[in-house]
Amino acid sequence: MRGLMAATFVAGMAAPDLTTKHESGRCAIRGHCGSQSFFGSQLPCPDNGLATPPSAELRDHIVSVCGTAWQDTANVCCTEEQVETLESNLKKAQNIISACPACKTNFFDMFCTFTCSPDQSLFVNVTQTVPKGDKYLVTELDHLISDEFGTGFYDSCKDVKFGATGGRAMEFIGGGAKNYTVRILPRVLPGHDSC
């Protein structure tokens, strides 16, 4: 009976806000909606709504993490909690890529844009969600990257060595990539339980 009630509740929930509209000024994800397990990472909420003006505090935080290029951005698709997580994750990566300013800049730009761009729906497409309570968690998405940026990003980081191990930074930040190829594949988000 308990399983039946849960299934009925999920079926009665409003459908998730997948990325059905792809246009400037529109988001694909926004905020944290929870994790799938006790130790799992926070997963974003699907949100295909309009980008919104950041508070002064949020703008200052984005600028402190992502740089002055974000100072005059009128609208964003991120929340304070997302920028806090972004900052924490970028600090971890910084130790690996700090030897090359171009690699660091490209890496930070990619993740700042992914997280906060007001035009997020033009390059992020939510492809899978799962219900959690009265919300949906984004568990897979497509992140589209131009050939120019992808090649430039790879080329700027491919020879960077990580001092602690002497290994290449791409082993850590690029999954051991040996080159840049364009592929549109579902991206399983960290914290998504998949085997």
Image (spheres, rainbow, N blue to C red):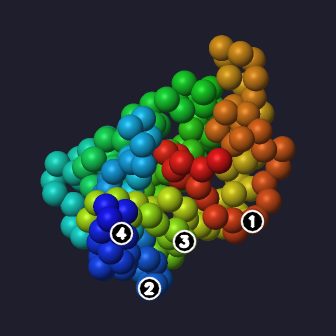
C-alpha separation, residue under disc 3 versus residue under disc 1: 15 Å
Residue at the farthest front position: 1
Residue at the farthest top position: 164
Mark 2–mark 3 CB contact (< 8 Å): no
Query: How far across and down, in percent of the image, does residue 189 sit?
Result: 53, 52
**Amino acid beneath label 4:** Leu
Neighbourhood count class around disc 2 (C-alpha, 10 Å): few under 14, some 14–19, many 20 upward:
some
Neighbourhood count class around disc 1 (C-alpha, 10 Å): few under 14, some 14–19, many 20 upward:
few
Judge whether 48 appears above or below 96 on screen.
below
Choose mark 3 or mark 1, whichever is in front. Answer: 3
Residue drawn at 54 percent across, 71 percent down: 127
C-alpha separation, residue under disc 4 versus residue under disc 3: 26 Å
Disc 4 marks which residue?
4
Judge whether 161 appears above or below 3 on screen.
above
Disc 3 marks which residue?
127
The quarter of the picture where the N terminus appears is: bottom left
Q: Nearer the viewer, residue 103 or 41?
A: 41
Choose mark 2 or mark 4, whichever is in front. Answer: 4
Disc 1 marks which residue?
183
User: Can residue 95 be seen at all in this image of the molecule?
Assistant: yes
User: Can residue 67 be seen at all in this image of the molecule?
Assistant: no
Mark 1–mark 4 CB contact (< 8 Å): no
Secondary structure state at the residue bearing disc 1? loop
